[in-house]
Amino acid sequence: MSFEKLVIFYFSGTGNSKNVAQWMALAASKKNMECTIYNIASIERGSVVPVPKDSLVVFVSPVHGFNYPPVVLNFIARFPRGKNKVILMDTRAGMLIGKFNLPGISGVAFLLSSLILILKGYSIAGLKSVDLPSNWMSIHPGLNEKTVLFLHKKHKSEVLDFGEKIFSGQKIYVSLFEFIIDILVAPISIGYYLAGRFIFAKTFYASADCNNCDLCIKNCPVKAIVKIDNRPFWTFKCESCMRCISNCPKRGIEVAHGFILSFFCMLRH
């Protein structure tokens, strides 16, 4: 079965998932498919986006705490019922060690979302993880420009190939090996969703380099940053998507994620 229309919904903090959405749109254009792209963060809560019955639906999101972030899960949970074929894609923290591409882990991102969508009447036609440059710079080591360009080139090609096969009617899912690893990290996913994301959200702060330009407040995709005492303040709505840090012109935003992880490691001993 081939498709004529494609509808893509994406959420992106630093641009990885947005790139994947655009690559899928490019693959669709090569098949002369009509394509519409929606940014989940720009869709008003409660709004219903009409999806043509004969279209293929794609969800693209980064993985936060081995799961889709709450903003994406909430969107999928309130997505209207339907019979469409659905593709789930995620972007994970890709690393490059020498010439070896170290993949990330999806956790329960696909499992939970697939269950919700199947209960709504949809069928899952494909699953695809894309290991793009890690953007959690407070935890992962920084990647040089050469590594970033390599990962983008390599995985853009993979996404285009994936799109071509999916649009032609093939079904592609994650390997059994990945599935087993995803199941093993499920407890971490649950812990992050219930408590961890709130702890990490409160570790962001504006340093002395902040000049109160308010770009972080204006550009936050989930409106999680507010102004208190003339300084940016991160609320519990923060998704730790890292857009604020990546876009800050003064590099005036810092986090204490490393301190939090060290604290929990100390507690274990």
Image (cartoon, rainbow, N blue to C red):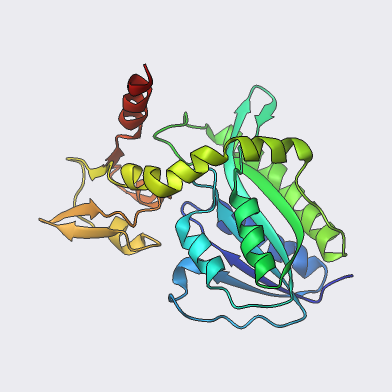
Q: Nearer the viewer, residue 129 or 111?
A: 111
Q: Position of residue 148 (x, y in %)?
A: 58, 38
> Is 193 left or right of 79, judged from the image as shown?
left
| Left or right side of 7 for 228 | left
Does 149 sit left or right of 123 as displayed? Answer: left
Residue at 69% from the left image edge and 66% from the top image edge: 118
Pick the front one: 235 or 132? 235
Q: Position of residue 238 (x, y in %)?
A: 35, 54
Q: Is residue 260 above or below residue 110?
A: above
Q: What residue is shown at x 20% (from left), y 41% (from top)?
A: 209
Q: Quadrant of the C terminus?
A: top left
Q: Quadrant of residue 179?
A: top right
Could you say where residue 85 lies in the image, as x and y percent from the top left? Answer: 76, 69
Q: Residue at x 23, y 57 (%)?
A: 213
In percent of width and height, residue 14 lies at: 47, 51
Residue 214 shown left or right of residue 108 in the figure: left
Picture layout, residue 242 above or below residue 28: above
Instruction: Name the residue furthest left.
Output: 229
**Rendered-image quadrant of the N terminus:** bottom right
Quarter residue 261 falls in: top left
Q: Nearer the viewer, residue 242 or 19?
A: 242
**Rendered image quadrant of residue 137:** top left
